[in-house]
């Protein structure tokens, strides 16, 4: 429950509230959002997505040689991720955005050293 409240606060912070009806809609549709409370930078977001996509343990020592900043920025742009004081949040409703992100991954990592 506490995690859902933090997610709700991130949604409110990212997208704003014009009236109580909008606030209620956000609460009713909280499942439509992905929330990354542990991410505080583009590099951390890139690492999270990369390790999840490729089923890699994020504690693998080899990952320290990869700079995820550019990759994370590209993904944040493609996914319409918003950074808030509560973590990163994004609405999961645009399949075109996912295709753009996957296309970017295929084209190159842009941050591997």
Image (cartoon, rainbow, N blue to C red):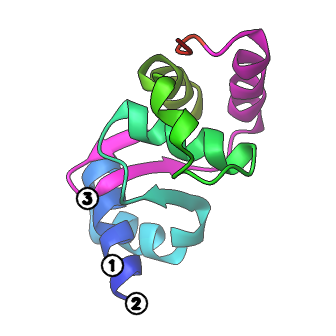
Dots 3, 2 in contact, CB < 8 A: no
Between the residue at mark 1 and the residue at mark 2, the CA separation in whole angstroms equals 6 Å
- Residue under pointer 1: 5
Location of residue 21 in the rendering, given as x and y in whole percent from the top left corner: 37, 70
Dots 1, 2 in contact, CB < 8 A: yes
Between the residue at mark 3 and the residue at mark 2, the CA separation in whole angstroms equals 15 Å
Q: Quadrant of the N terminus?
A: bottom left
Magenta stretch contains residue 9: no
Location of residue 9 in the rendering, given as x and y in whole percent from the top left corner: 28, 66
Magenta stretch contains residue 81: yes
Dots 3, 1 in contact, CB < 8 A: no
Between the residue at mark 3 and the residue at mark 1, the CA separation in whole angstroms equals 10 Å
> What number of labels is visible?
3
Question: What residue sits 38% from the left and 40% below the top?
Answer: 82
Q: Is residue 5 visible?
A: yes
The furthest residue to the left: 85
Location of residue 25 in the rendering, given as x and y in whole percent from the top left corner: 47, 69
Viewer-side residue, 33 vs 68: 68
User: Crowding near pointer 2: few (<14 within 10 Å), some, many (20+)?
Assistant: few
Question: What residue sits 41% from the left and 40% below the top?
Answer: 44
Location of residue 31 in the rendering, given as x and y in whole percent from the top left corner: 59, 70
- Residue under pointer 3: 86
Question: What residue sits 26% from the left and 48% below the top?
Answer: 84
Q: Which residues are magenta?
A: 80-109
- Residue under pointer 2: 1
* 110 left or right of 101 in image: left
């Amino acid at each position: 429950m506490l995690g859902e409240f933090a997610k709700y606060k991130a949604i409110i912070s990212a997208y704003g509230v014009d009236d109580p009806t909008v606030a209620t809609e956000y609460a009713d549709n909280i499942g439509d959002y992905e929330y990354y409370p542990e991410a505080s930078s583009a590099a951390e977001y890139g690492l999270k997505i990369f390790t999840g996509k490729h089923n890699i343990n994020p504690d693998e020592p080899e990952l320290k040689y990869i700079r995820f900043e550019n990759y994370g920025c590209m993904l944040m742009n493609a996914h319409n991720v918003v950074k808030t004081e509560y973590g990163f949040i994004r609405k999961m409703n645009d399949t075109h955005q996912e295709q753009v992100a996957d296309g970017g991954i295929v084209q190159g990592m842009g941050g591997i050293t």
